[in-house]
Amino acid sequence: MLRVDLDKCSGCRTCEMACSLAHAGEFNPLKSRIRVVRKKLHGVFIPVYCMQCTSLPCAKACPVGAISRDEDTWAVLINDEKCIRCGACAQACPFGAITYDPDTKDLIKCDLCGGDPKCAKQCIDGAIVLMPFEAVGVEKRLAHAKKTAASYLTDKKWVEVVP
Amino acid sequence: MRYAVPENILRVDLSGQKLLKQELPDELARNYLGGRGANAKILWDELRAGVDPLSPFNILVFGIGPANGTIAPASGRYNVSAKSPLTGFFGDANSGGHWAAELRYAGYGNLIFYGRAEKPVYLWINDEEIEIRDASHLWGKDTWETEDIIIDELGDPEVKVACIGPAGENLVRCACVINEKTRAAGRTGMGAVMGSKNLKAIAVRGTSGVKVADPEGLFEFRKDANKLISTDLFYELYSKFGTPGLMTIYNEFGSQTHYNSKEGYVKEGVNLYGEIFTEKCVKHVSACFSCPLHCSSIYAIESGPYACVGESCEYENLTAYGTRCGNYDLESTVYASTLADKLGLDTISSGATIGFAMECWERGLITQKDTDGLIMEWGNRDAIIEALDRMAHRKGNFGNLLAEGTKRMSERIAGSENFAIHIKGLDTPAVDPRGMMAYGGLGYAVASRGGDHLRALAALGYSLPGKAKELFGSEEAADRFSIKYAAPVVKFHEEMRAVTDSLDICKYITRTALLLPDMIAKLINTLTGWGVNSSEVLRIGERIVNLERAFNLREGLTRKDDTQPKRMLKEPLKTGGAAGHVVNLEPMLDDYYKIRGWDVKTGFPTRSKLEELGLNEVVTELRKIGKLSEG
């Protein structure tokens, strides 16, 4: 799954460019499956994209069964052949991560680029990373542990000689 | 099929309230790319020489190029150009953010404004639908209020706004254009030209896509570019501290502007170093559209008299209201920078004018009678902030005096001309040229828009001595005090800056990382499919530089205007790493004219140079007015 580090996101929207190019062959934020919500002067840049939820609210809302999970990539996919463009999935999505392509009127969402997400490839600071479910939180746990350890070990000079 | 180049240009007659949409001509893109180059060509073709820059006869052009709105690195820039009310020559300013990309998605390469609206208006571009709307309710509002009101009334938070503040409305000569509240097309008074046309803002929303010739090639180019940029010498400095990181370098070089250029090094400068600014003020990293460098930041001062929040407090701003005015207090400097964004003032020029007034005060050339009571002592932080407000609103005699800018002030204050720090009427930037010969000494003197570092930004020498040797044949080209290689170094950089300003991508990623013409040729080719090589890239740059030269000659420029403030030529710096140095300009200027193919005595371009660049119509016109060298 894709994970975003909000401390690192600069709001540059390169991810939108990489995504719309990969999926629509052109540069257009409206065709990007990832959209950065920018509240600049609040210092908040939030890339919004499909979280590939386990409970599949979009698939449950779909009246024709066009939405299913790809077990290899864990991506939730829309079958364009079956899809009737009703937009029920877009309404059901709690993140606003399913939108219409303005030209084709197809419903579009993140498909993890078949397991090789282009947005993550171009994110220079690694704000967007593809990681397996079980790896989520590892970095944060380590950072938290390091901080705690540092305060805990302040008097213990001997740790400095541990190689 | 045409790739990447914006589809249309839009002509707006503000006097007659008429709009004309035309296809953007192929040859404009082929010869000038877009942005600054296309703006220059449009002004050369359409602007009558000798008009008052603040009259309805001036023409204001916004321009973007083939890189905007794509994954091309740092492709968030636009240029706005007109005859400058500060210099009377080619006026041009460049800004980042996300406004340019929005304009690209609406499908316009250039917006050309003529005449003057009867009452305040703003332009609303909603893809194909364009409307000139009433702006009476916005007149008098600052740039932040203006943007909030426009977005609110148009009802779409994705709308991007470029506008002027009170400074532009009041025709303050150094007024700028501000987009998205904090990004400034700062220099040469383009905000005043906008104000003179009663044009308060341009709001844009675009929803069409951009197709490029070689999408995969461009994707790979960006990946390679990311690698080059992130391993560049200056990546750490820019991405961590932003441009404020430069304060550290230039103060230690002894080449920092302090006290209206009286000093090049001051110990207290350390209070304004990038590391300190970042630690005390920065809250979050921030970037312009599609930029891997993210040199910007959201900053805040949370309490006290200088509480403020903003984006992108640059090195130049810390110089303008800090070191230049003898103010070494960080919080008031950051506050003044934020205020300037709201008022719509160019930070460099407004700060320089206040610094100049402070030296006039120190020498007793102006007193409280002239300043309407304001105590203009060095480092008087509240006077700096009050002066900004009076300048923007032309409040009282002193506000009106400041609003005219350094050059015109010095003409009114007897005995002040020797320390009026401007070139062609444009205040020089933060780096003192006495410590940087090619970059500042020659670069500022010949810049087409006056005292400016970004026309050449000759950074290669002192950043990458190895590369300098490869390109110019000697490591001496990297010596910041040497004048021997200044001319070829400046010429090369001017060509490349003209190209990037026209694409329109940022100078900071092309500063050294993506500087070389073969990289830029690759970028142009993946975007457009034109198949240009590196010498053609340099030729486009050279064509733009020569066209701007011709524009300035037509407006009356002579060799005498390619100069430095007297202080830079005659008064050696006293302390710091550049102590003892002055700018030895004349030999550099001779060399520069020679390699440019311009007449050494007059600075007129030669017929052969112009013809080589395909500028035949320029030959005809310069010949008509007696400003062509037949050599």
Image: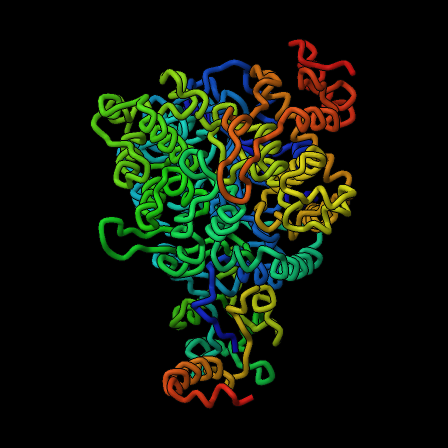
Give the position of the N terminus of chain B as an image quadrant: top right
Confirm whether residue B128 shows in the render.
Answer: no
Q: Is residue A49 above or below residue B26?
A: below
Q: Position of residue B201 (x, y in %)?
A: 39, 36
The residue under the point 34% across, 21% down is B118
Q: Position of residue B24 (x, y in %)?
A: 61, 34
The residue under the point 49% across, 50% down is B243
Confirm whether residue B289 shows in the render.
Answer: yes
The residue under the point 60% across, 16% down is B558
Give the position of the C terminus of chain B as an image quadrant: top right
Q: How is the image coloured?
A: rainbow
Q: What is the tally of numbered marks visible in this picture?
A: 0
Q: Position of residue A56 (x, y in %)?
A: 44, 80
Is B320 in front, or is A73?
B320
Q: Position of residue B98 (x, y in %)?
A: 48, 49
Q: Quadrant of residue B140?
A: top left
Q: Is residue B139 above or below residue B473?
A: above
The residue under the point 64% across, 9% down is B625
Is B187 in front, or is B500?
B187
Give the residue at the far left of this rendering: B373
Is B39 in front, or is B564?
B564
Q: Is residue B177 left or right of residue B614?
A: left
